[in-house]
Image: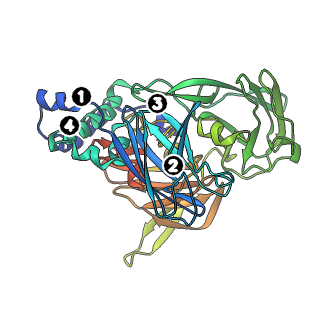
C-alpha cells in the first residue's frame, strides 16, 4: 500500500502547466509593487449583552490594527486587546455610542480581546485575535488591503504561491519539519512500547513563517502509532516542556486510570517527569487520535496530537467500492483495493489555518495513480467547524469516529467538527490536479492568493 507522503512523483510537475492560468502579466514593476508595506487593517466590532461580535478576527502581521467598536448593548462596555504584558483598551463606551481602538502591528500568534467590565468576560464577552504572517489572511481580513492592490499584483501574488506549492513536487518540501511519521515500537514478549517525548520548538508553518509550537518527537502532527486489536500497548510519555502534560486517547476504550484527565484519572506529568499508559486494544480497526488534555487549548492548538491507528488484522482496509446506477443511486460492491492512503489533520489556532500543521503553499498534495482507490483519514484537532471540499469528485464517506458506516454516503463537501474523524474513499478515475480545501473561504483564499487550508489531489 502506498502512502501519499512517501513520494512526490516528478511526473506531476505537470501541475505547473495546469495552474499557469493564474499568472497574468507583470514583471519588475509588479514585483516592486508587491514588496510594498502592509496596509493598515481595519475591523468592525459590536458589543452587546454578553458577547463580542465577531468572536474571532484574522489579522496580518506587519500592519497597524484599527478597531471600530460600537456598543449595541444597554449598559457600558469596553473593548481591549491583550498583547503579552500590554493591554490596549478603549474608554468605557456608553450604550449606543462608538469608539476607535488603535493597536500597533503585532507578531504572529493568538491574542485575546475582551470587555474589561468586571464579570463581563466570564459571561462571554471575549474573543480571539489570530495574527498570521500571511498576505492572504491580511487581505481577507481587511478590504483596504484589496483596494491597495492592482490586478497585476493580485495575479502575481497568487501565482507566486502556486509556484511555491508546485516546486515541492520536484524539489521536496519547502519548509522544515514533517509530521505523521510511523513510530516503531519496541517489542518485549506480547507488549508493544511506544515512546513519546513532548518538547517546545519553533515550527515552520509556511516558507519562512515560524511559530512557537509543541510537538511529540519533534513532529506535528505527532508520530503515527499503529496497533492491532488485542495488542498489549504501553505508551511512555516524557515531558520536556515547561508546563504540565497529560495524554488522552481520543475515541479509545481504555481503563479509567489510563484516560488522561488531570486530577480526575491521574496527576499531571510535570516538567522533567514521565508517565506510562498501559492498556489492551479492545476497539475494532479504525482511525483514533491521541492528544494532550492539559491546557489543551494551547497545547493541542500548538501541535500535541497524533494518529492512533488500529489496523485491520489482515492489513487491508475493507471498505466497499461504489458505483452509481443509471438513476444516480449509490451501489456498493466488493471491497475497494486501497492504492493510496493519507492522514489529514485539519486545524486552526496558534498554528493558523493548517492541514497537517502546514499552511499553503507548504501543504503536501495527495498523490495517486489513475484508477487508484484513495483512502483519506480526516480529523479535526482545531476549535472550529471545517467543511472540506474536493474538486472534481464525489467521495464516499465510509467511516465516522473509527466505525464503518452501515450506509456509506456520497458527498463532495464534508463538515468536520472539532474532535470528529471521518474516512473517505475516492476512486481516482479523473486525471489532473484537483483542489482540496476548507470551504470557509476566509480560511483559504484572499486577493493575494491561496493560503491556509488548501492542498490538492493529484491524479497522474
- Position of residue 188 relative to residue 444, above or below, is above
Q: Nearer the viewer, residue 48 or 14?
A: 48
Where is residue 459 drawn, in percent x and y? 35, 45
Using the numbered discs, state the Cα–Cα distance from disc 3 to disc 1 in whole angstroms: 19 Å
- Disc 1 element: loop
Residue on which disc 3 sits: 107
Q: Earlier in the sequence, mark 4 or mark 2?
A: 4
Please identify the quarter of the rendering in which residue 200 is found: top right
At which x and y percent is residue 22?
20, 43
Relative image position of residue 93 (x, y in whole percent): 51, 55
State which quadrant residue 44 falls in.
bottom left
- Nearer to us in this view, 447 or 41: 41
- The one nearer the camera, 324 or 41, is 41
Q: Is residue 40 visible?
A: yes
The residue beneath circle 1 is 35
Query: In what element is the residue under mark 2?
Result: strand
Amino acid at each position: 500500500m502506498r502512502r501519499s507522503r512517501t513520494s512526490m512523483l516528478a511526473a506531476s510537475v505537470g501541475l505547473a502547466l495546469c495552474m499557469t492560468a493564474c499568472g497574468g502579466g507583470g514583471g519588475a514593476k509588479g514585483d516592486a509593487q508587491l514588496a510594498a508595506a502592509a496596509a493598515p487593517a481595519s475591523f468592525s466590532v459590536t458589543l452587546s449583552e454578553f458577547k463580542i461580535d465577531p468572536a474571532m478576527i484574522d489579522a496580518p502581521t506587519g500592519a497597524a490594527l484599527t478597531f471600530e467598536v460600537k456598543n449595541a448593548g444597554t449598559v457600558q462596555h469596553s473593548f481591549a486587546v491583550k498583547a503579552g504584558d500590554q493591554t490596549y483598551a478603549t474608554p468605557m463606551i456608553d450604550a449606543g455610542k462608538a469608539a476607535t481602538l488603535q493597536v500597533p502591528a503585532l507578531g504572529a500568534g493568538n491574542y485575546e480581546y475582551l470587555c474589561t467590565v468586571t464579570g463581563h468576560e466570564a459571561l462571554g464577552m471575549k474573543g480571539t485575535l489570530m495574527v498570521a504572517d500571511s498576505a492572504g489572511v491580511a487581505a481577507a481580513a481587511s478590504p483596504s488591503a484589496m483596494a491597495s492592490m492592482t490586478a497585476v499584483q493580485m495575479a502575481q501574488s497568487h501565482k507566486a504561491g502556486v509556484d511555491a506549492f508546485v516546486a515541492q513536487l520536484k524539489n521536496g518540501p519547502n519548509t522544515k519539519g514533517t509530521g505523521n511519521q510511523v513510530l516503531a515500537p519496541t517489542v518485549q514478549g506480547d507488549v508493544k512500547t511506544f515512546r513519546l517525548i513532548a518538547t517546545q520548538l519553533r515550527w515552520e508553518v509556511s516558507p519562512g513563517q515560524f511559530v512557537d509550537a509543541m510537538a511529540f518527537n519533534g513532529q506535528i502532527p505527532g508520530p503515527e502509532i499503529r496497533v492491532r486489536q488485542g495488542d498489549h500497548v504501553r505508551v511512555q510519555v516524557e515531558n520536556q516542556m515547561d508546563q504540565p502534560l497529560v495524554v488522552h486517547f481520543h475515541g479509545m476504550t481504555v481503563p479509567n486510570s489510563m484516560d488522561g484527565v488531570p486530577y480526575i484519572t491521574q496527576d499531571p506529568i510535570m516538567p522533567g517527569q514521565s508517565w506510562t499508559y498501559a492498556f489492551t486494544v479492545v476497539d475494532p480497526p479504525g482511525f483514533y487520535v491521541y492528544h494532550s488534555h492539559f491546557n489543551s487549548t494551547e497545547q493541542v492548538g500548538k501541535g500535541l496530537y497524533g494518529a492512533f491507528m488500529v489496523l485491520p488484522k489482515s492489513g487491508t482496509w475493507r471498505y466497499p467500492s461504489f458505483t452509481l446506477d443509471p438513476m444516480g443511486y449509490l451501489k456498493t460492491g466488493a471491497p475497494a483495493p486501497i492504492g493510496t492512503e493519507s492522514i489529514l489533520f485539519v486545524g486552526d489556532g496558534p498554528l493558523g489555518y493548517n492541514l497537517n500543521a502546514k499552511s499553503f503553499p507548504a501543504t503536501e498534495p495527495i498523490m495517486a495513480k489513475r484508477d487508484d482507490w484513495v483512502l483519506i483519514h480526516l480529523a479535526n484537532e482545531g476549535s472550529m467547524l471545517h467543511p472540506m471540499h474536493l474538486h472534481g469528485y464525489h467521495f464516499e464517506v465510509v467511516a465516522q469516529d473509527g466505525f464503518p458506516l452501515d450506509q456509506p454516503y456520497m458527498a463532495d463537501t464534508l463538515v468536520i467538527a472539532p474532535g470528529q474523524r471521518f474516512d473517505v474513499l475516492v476512486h481516482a478515475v479523473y486525471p489532473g490536479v484537483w483542489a482540496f480545501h476548507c470551504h470557509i473561504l476566509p480560511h483559504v483564499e484572499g486577493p493575494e492568493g491561496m493560503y491556509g487550508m488548501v492542498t490538492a489531489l493529484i491524479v497522474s
